[in-house]
Amino acid sequence: MRKRTSPKPSTLRKSWLLGASVPAVMLASGIALSQAQASYDKKDDERSESRSAGEAVTDGWITTKVKSKLVVDQEVSGFDISVETRDKVVYLSGEVENQSQVSHAVEIAEETEGVKRVDATSLRVATAIDQMRDAVGMRDD
């Protein structure tokens, strides 16, 4: 009789990551698509810019607006960028593929109503090694 062995922890981890990643990607894609179709167009920007002086632009509103613009944008992955706003200063963090995406994300945030300044010092460009590890699911962070 052959003794039954349990799988290695790394094999279990990879299986779990794959099992959790597929539904998450499908959900994220569906959310991005529905948001793109339902909420973001140029008319929405024009309406928000014509808000009355009595309506306050809060940090929460700015964060929501910047994040939704990033999520529907075709040039950056809004799911890889975190947005935080304090005293109308937008802080972008996370990881993007290249410097052009950093610049584009900053531009999107700067064009949002109520933003005084954008700090993207915590938004880093992924190295080729990071991208390969992500592709095969071997990232430890």
Image: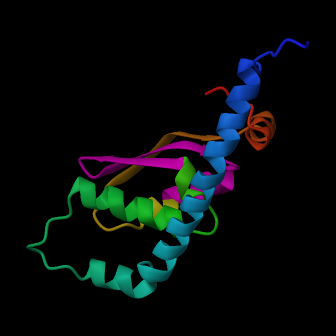
Q: Give the camera-side residue of 71 and 27.
A: 27
The residue positioned farthest toward the left in the image shown: 54
Q: Give the camera-side residue of 85 and 119.
A: 85
Q: How many numbered marks have been drawn onto this rendered protein structure?
A: 0
The residue positioned farthest toward the bottom in the image shown: 43
Q: Give the camera-side residue of 2 and 60.
A: 2
Q: Is residue 90 left or right of residue 28?
A: left
The residue that appears at 20% across and 79% down in the rendered structure is 51
Whether the magenta-drawn stretch holds residue 98 is answered as yes
Q: Is residue 140 left or right of residue 42?
A: right
The residue that appears at 70% across and 27% down in the rendered structure is 12
Q: Give the camera-side residue of 19 and 21.
A: 19
Q: Which residues are magenta?
A: 81-106
* Coordinates of residue 91 in the picture (x, y in percent): 40, 45
Q: Is residue 132 left or right of residue 27?
A: right
Quadrant of the snapshot with the N terminus: top right
Quadrant of the snapshot with the C terminus: top right
* Vertical side of 9 occupied by 53: above or below: below
* Coordinates of residue 92 in the picture (x, y in percent): 46, 46
The residue that appears at 61% across and 44% down in the rendered structure is 20
* Coordinates of residue 45 in the picture (x, y in percent): 37, 79
Q: Quadrant of the rendered structure where residue 111 is?
A: bottom left
Whether residue 115 is visible here, answered yes or no, is: no
The residue positioned farthest toward the front in the image shown: 1
Whether residue 35 is visible here, answered yes or no, is: yes
* Vertical side of 129 occupied by 109: above or below: below
The residue that appears at 41% across and 50% down in the rendered structure is 118
Whether the magenta-drawn stretch holds residue 33 is answered as no
* Coordinates of residue 8 in the picture (x, y in percent): 76, 18
* Vertical side of 97 occupied by 13: above or below: above
